[in-house]
Image (tube, rainbow, N blue to C red):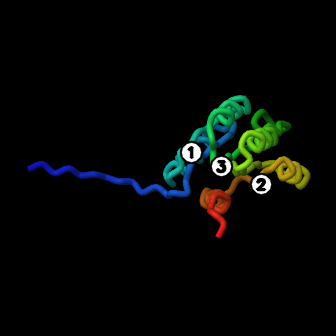
Amino acid sequence: MAWVLLVVRLVDPRAGRLLIVDDEAAIRFALSEYFRGNGWSVDSAAEKEEAEALLTCTEYAVVIADLRLTGIYGVEGLDIIQLSRHLRPETRVVLLTGNGTPELEAEARRRGADAFLHKPLPLARLEAVVDSLVEPES
């Protein structure tokens, strides 16, 4: 008699599809692995144009985007917020930056960012913010 062992991985039913946009490969990799390990389906993009293409054809529960994708003066993350809001207003958007100012935060929120976070931050803190954005309201 043969025995079959079935391994079932429990996935959080709240977790859905997530897009990570960052020009730094190490950050994309770390965030992707972390959120995959927590039950999310994850896509990632290194450039604004790649993110735009993914946003156009894929429905995301959450987008996590870096503010600057092309150098110290870039603000492509603001465009990603705006496009995401235009295409799918229900998608939650988190903007990450290592160079935030009150003016940039105000502009990000004006364009529709749900959260504006400063790097570096613990992954558990980012996860807590993401979870708070996708939890159903009681």
Q: Position of residue 68 (x, y in %)?
A: 78, 40
Reading the image, the residue beneath label 2 is 116
Q: Residue at x 51, y 54 (%)?
A: 38
Asked which secondary structure carries label 2, the reply is: strand
Q: Residue at x 62, y 37 (%)?
A: 58
Q: Residues within 10 Å of mark 3 (few under 14, many from 20)?
A: many
The numbered mark at residue 32 is: 1
Asked which secondary structure carries label 1, the reply is: helix
Instruction: Estimate the spatial distance between the alpha carbons at disc 1 and disc 2, rounded to whole Å.
Output: 19 Å
Quadrant (top left/top right/bottom left/bottom right) for the C terminus: bottom right
Mark earlier in primary sequence (1, 2): 1
Amino acid type of the residue tagged 3 in the rendering:
Val
Horizontally, residue 39 falls left or right of residue 53, namely left
Reading the image, the residue beneath label 3 is 62
Vertical order, 34 against 80 (above or below): below
Horizontally, residue 55 falls left or right of residue 40, namely right
Tell me the mark number nearer the camera, choosing from 2 and 3: 3
Q: In the image as oriented, which residue stretches furthest toward the left?
A: 1
Residue 73 appears in the figure:
yes
